[in-house]
Amino acid sequence: MSKHQALDTFGRSGNPVMGNKFDGDAQFRDLPISQKMTLEGTVNKTGILLLLCFATAAVSWNIPNLVLMFSGMGVGFIAAIITIFKPTMASSTAPVYALAQGLFLGGITVMFEAQYPGIAIQAIGLTFGTLASLLVCYKTGIIKPTENFRLMIVSATAGIALLYMVNILMTMFGGGSGIGFIHSNGIMGIGFSLFVVGIAALNLVLDFDFIEQGSENGLPKYMEWFGAFSLMVTLVWLYLEILRLLAKLRSN
């Protein structure tokens, strides 16, 4: 595969956050090495985002406050939307996203921890254990991000997002609890949560592929922040779904 073809394939990355940012334009190939995306740079920036997230999560954990938690959720959502549509701003918006999500995650984790003591450390351990396991599977070729794999993960992710959106609308305007099995701690509810956790975890493979291909194809330096941001989005989603799954299991 030529470098041009590789970049074109990369441009069709299946990751929902990445979207179709690049379509094979060769303009990036002439950038100086110092201005190109690298694997090491992306890893370092991912570490920075994680540290920022943990810092504000610690604040929210020690000072539980609903206003703080929902403010973090709102600011994080806005920062994510800006980052997705304006990747060139990722160096500024990605840290804001990490800080804001930390406030949200710390607050919601306190609520789960109050009801199910010990659930926080379990969820954190499982999240990073899954991250490590998927990274090993990706690097060893056990899991390969083929076109069919991408299509399956993107379709499933879109379906889950649509289902959650319908659930929120039903809750807001229907006056009920939304789609029952999403919140149920029965067999269907637990099965659904297991499925969502699986899809969230497999999205990590798309993130790994994006970062690796982007580094090999010499994308602009700001894409290091965008790659780190995408990985953070997936980890936040995975953590929340693992938290929900553990809560369902513990409630039984």
Image (cartoon, rainbow, N blue to C red):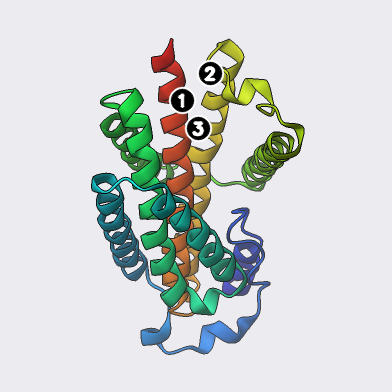
Q: Which amino acid does label 2 sit on?
A: Ile
Q: Which mark is residue 190?
A: 2
Circle 1 SS class? helix
Q: In this rendering, is residue 60 above or below 81?
A: above
Residue 15 place in picture, x, y as percent: 59, 54
Between disc 1 and disc 3, whose residue precedes?
Answer: 3
Q: To which residue does mark 1 refer?
A: 245
Amino acid carrying mark 3 in the image: Val
Q: Is residue 109 left or right of residue 160?
A: left
Q: Name the residue under label 3.
A: 197
| Marks 1 & 3, CB-CB < 8 Å contact | yes
Mark 2 or 3: in front is: 2
Q: In this view, does 73 lie to the left or right of 140?
A: right
Q: Can residue 142 be seen in this view?
A: no
Q: Do the residues labelled 2 and 3 touch (CB within 8 Å)?
A: no
Furthest residue to the right?
174
Q: How far apart are marks 1 and 2 (CA)?
A: 7 Å
Task: Judge whether 143 appears above or below 5 on screen.
Answer: above
The part of the image, by quadrant, that contains residue 134 is top left
Residue drawn at 65 percent across, 79 percent down? 25
Q: Which residue is drawn at 37% across and 31% down?
A: 112
- Residue located 32% across and 37% down the image: 110
